[in-house]
Image: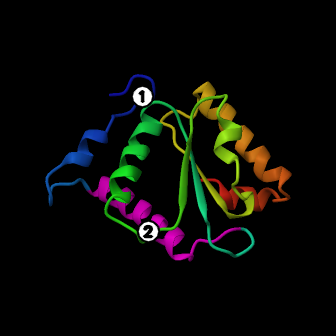
């Protein structure tokens, strides 16, 4: 049991042998895969009904490193996605990360186990403000932030 959340830590189940993956893990994998496919194909589109061109992943520690390793590994074998992917974890890195990006075509993924880490919550607020100052309304900000 993870004492900080009073629930079982199930991440080790992701490494279960084929055919032995618990149904709750498979269900979440399927949801994530469908969402990723929808973003890449344009079925999940921006608030203005265009394709996303960039992704900012906001997170620190393992919430950044896990996605970064996956992205780098998968990019080696794929030319199917033209998405520009950037990572934001340091509090002083915001301007470098968003430089040259269009908020109207950027998807923001907030990656956190607890959603209480100071860096992650501060950077998530800064990114939401960046989206808002671009003219996106609250529905648009929700569409661009997962």
Q: Is residue 61 magenta?
A: no
- Between marks 1 and 2 in the image, the one whose residue lies nearer the viewer: 2
- Left or right, residue 135 beside residue 142: right
Q: Which residue is mark 1?
A: 6
Badge 1 element: loop
Residue, x 74% and y 46% (percent of image)? Answer: 128
Q: Is residue 79 above or below residue 66?
A: below
Q: Is residue 45 magenta?
A: yes
Badge 2 element: helix
Identity of the residue furthest to the top in this view: 3
Image quadrant of residue 84?
bottom right
Image coordinates for residue 50, horizontal then vertical, percent = 68, 75
Residue, x 14% and y 52% (percent of image)? Answer: 17
* Quadrant housing the N terminus: top left
| Mark identifier at residue 32 | none
Image coordinates for residue 6, horizontal then vertical, percent = 42, 28
Residues 24 and 77: in front is 77
Report the predominant secondary structure element of the magenta stretch: helix
Q: Which residue is mark 2?
A: 34
Residue at mark 1 to residue at mark 2: CA–CA distance: 29 Å
Q: Earlier in the sequence, mark 1 or mark 2?
A: 1
The local crowd at label 2, few if under 14, some if 14 to 19, many if 20 or more residues have their Cα within 10 Å, is: few
Question: What is the span of residues highlighted in magenta in the rendered image?
Answer: 23-46
Image coordinates for residue 118, horizontal then vertical, percent = 62, 25
Residues 83 and 24: in front is 83
């Amino acid at each position: 049991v993870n004492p900080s959340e009073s629930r079982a830590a199930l991440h080790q189940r992701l490494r279960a042998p084929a055919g032995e993956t618990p149904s709750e893990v498979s269900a979440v994998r399927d949801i994530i895969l469908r969402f990723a496919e929808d973003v890449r194909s344009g079925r999940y589109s921006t608030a203005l009904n265009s394709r996303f061109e960039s992704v900012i992943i906001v997170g620190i520690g393992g919430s950044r490193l896990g996605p970064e390793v996956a992205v780098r590994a998968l990019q080696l074998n794929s030319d199917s996605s033209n998405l520009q992917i950037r990572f934001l974890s340091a509090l002083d890195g915001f301007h470098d990360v968003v430089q040259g990006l269009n908020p109207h075509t950027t998807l923001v993924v907030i990656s956190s186990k607890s959603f209480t880490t100071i860096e992650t919550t501060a950077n998530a607020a800064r990114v939401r403000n960046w989206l808002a100052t671009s003219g996106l309304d609250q529905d648009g900000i929700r569409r661009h932030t997962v």
